[in-house]
């Protein structure tokens, strides 16, 4: 089996609503349905990597009875993602992401997917062990396998475990999984602050003392920082006519992983990913950053010529 990028997903459908204002506790207002797209941060990242040309596989458990399952798989296939490892279960419930929008701002509520544990078959073990990179969320890892031993075995076979660090960090296992198992991390500044509040020391220091090789902390219009064990690299946000920032971080991560898989150095991956994240803001939806390498390089050329 060829080495691949494996995305262990918590699927969802993104439902967009337009609102007149964001509400406080006890208030009510009308939300007007605006759009519906296949989403989920892990699936978005998989689509970006696959569209750029990576061998991206998704492991997920979808509802056997929900019509949205077919839509998700069709969408993934359309971006070049290998969805053949997806399983189906009567007890699974597909996730939803409710995105309430006002002008350029948004408020997001995630209704998590529910599904049984994966059975740790030889096929699942082979899929994990032959992964070059495994990308997921901490809580998805928790609800996917009864223990982390199968993931630790994959790491022994050379797989690097990369986390999307978006979390409330209300459960100790999320923090512990991240601190002890992560080889790479993509996280925004607000989530990193939440993580820091649950740690006695600086989280990156703790992670670099374990397995961590790199971390990217993004801060919207203020740019992003790449943390390596011996240095920090900052990149300003690329100036674009931003329409929707949904999925910008996923696009950054998906692009970074694609070029890392091709053998690029961390700093070059970061440069390219920064442009891909900016491109994602120029149109609407979590997979707006799913473009080919040629499109990415052309966008970089045009954008750099304007500065």
Image (cartoon, helix red, strand yellow):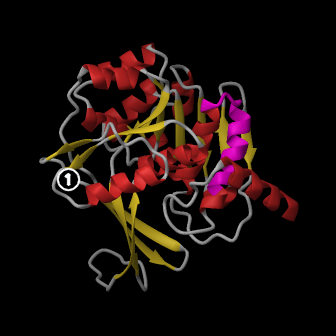
Query: Magenta segment: does it hold 272?
Result: yes
Image position of 150 (left or right of 1): left
224 within the magenta span: no
Residue 216 or 92: which is nearer the viewer? 92
User: What percent of the width, then of the height, locates residue 113?
Assistant: 26, 51
| Direction from residue 81 to residue 257 in the image, left or right | right
Main SS category, magenta section: helix
In the depicted structure, whether residue 217 falls above or below residue 28: above
> Relative to residue 267, is residue 286 depicted above or below?
below
- Front residue of 200/180: it is 180
Judging by the rendered image, the residue that carries numbered circle 1 is 93
The foreground one among 131 and 105 is 131
Q: Secondary structure at mark 1?
A: loop
Q: Position of residue 42 (x, y in %)?
A: 43, 46
Quadrant in the picture for residue 267: top right
**Residues packed near mark 1 inside 10 Å, few (<14), some (14 to 19) or many (20 plus):** many
Give the residues in magenta.
261-277
At horizontal 35% and vertical 20% (from top left) the residue drawn is: 126
Q: Position of residue 82 (x, y in %)?
A: 42, 41
**Viewed as shown, does residue 126 lie left or right of 289?**
left
Q: Is residue 211 above or below residue 282?
A: above
Please report the residue visible at 39 percent of the width from the left and 35 percent of the height from the top.
Answer: 175
- The residue located at (45%, 41%) in the rendering is 195
Tell me if I can see residue 113 in this picture. yes
Say whether residue 111 is left or right of residue 236: left
Residue at 30% in and 74% down: 25
Quadrant of the rendered image containing residue 172: top left
Depth check: give the residue in front, 185 or 24: 185
> Is there any visible trace of residue 161 in the rendered image?
no
Residue pushed farthest left?
A: 90
């Amino acid at each position: 089996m060829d080495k691949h990028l494996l995305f262990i997903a918590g699927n969802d459908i993104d439902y967009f609503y337009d609102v007149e204002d964001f509400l406080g506790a006890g208030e009510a207002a009308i939300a007007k349905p605006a759009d519906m797209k296949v989403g989920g941060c892990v699936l978005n990242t998989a689509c970006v990597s696959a569209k750029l040309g990576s061998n991206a596989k998704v492991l997920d458990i979808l509802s056997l009875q929900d019509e949205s399952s077919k839509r998700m798989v069709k969408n993934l296939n359309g971006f070049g993602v290998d969805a053949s490892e997806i399983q189906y279960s009567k007890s699974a419930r597909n996730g939803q992401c409710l995105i309430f929008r006002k002008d350029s701002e948004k408020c997001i509520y995630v209704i998590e997917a529910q599904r049984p544990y994966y059975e740790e078959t030889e096929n699942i073990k082979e899929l994990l062990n032959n992964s070059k990179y495994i990308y997921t969320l901490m809580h998805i890892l928790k609800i996917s396998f009864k223990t982390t031993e199968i993931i630790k075995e994959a790491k022994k076979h050379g797989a690097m475990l990369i986390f999307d660090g978006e979390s409330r960090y209300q459960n100790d296992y999320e923090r512990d999984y991240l601190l002890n198992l992560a080889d790479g991390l993509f996280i925004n500044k607000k989530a990193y602050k939440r993580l820091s509040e649950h740690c006695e020391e600086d989280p990156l220091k703790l992670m670099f003392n374990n397995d961590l090789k790199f971390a990217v902390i993004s801060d919207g219009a203020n740019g992003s920082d790449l943390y390596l064990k011996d240095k920090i690299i900052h990149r300003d946000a690329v100036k674009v006519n931003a329409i929707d920032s949904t999925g910008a971080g996923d696009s950054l991560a998906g692009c970074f992983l694609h070029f890392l898989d091709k053998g690029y150095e961390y700093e070059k991956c970061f440069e390219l990913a920064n442009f891909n994240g900016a491109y994602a803001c120029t149109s609407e939806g979590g997979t707006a950053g799913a473009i080919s390498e040629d499109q990415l390089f052309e966008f970089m050329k045009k954008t750099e010529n304007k500065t």
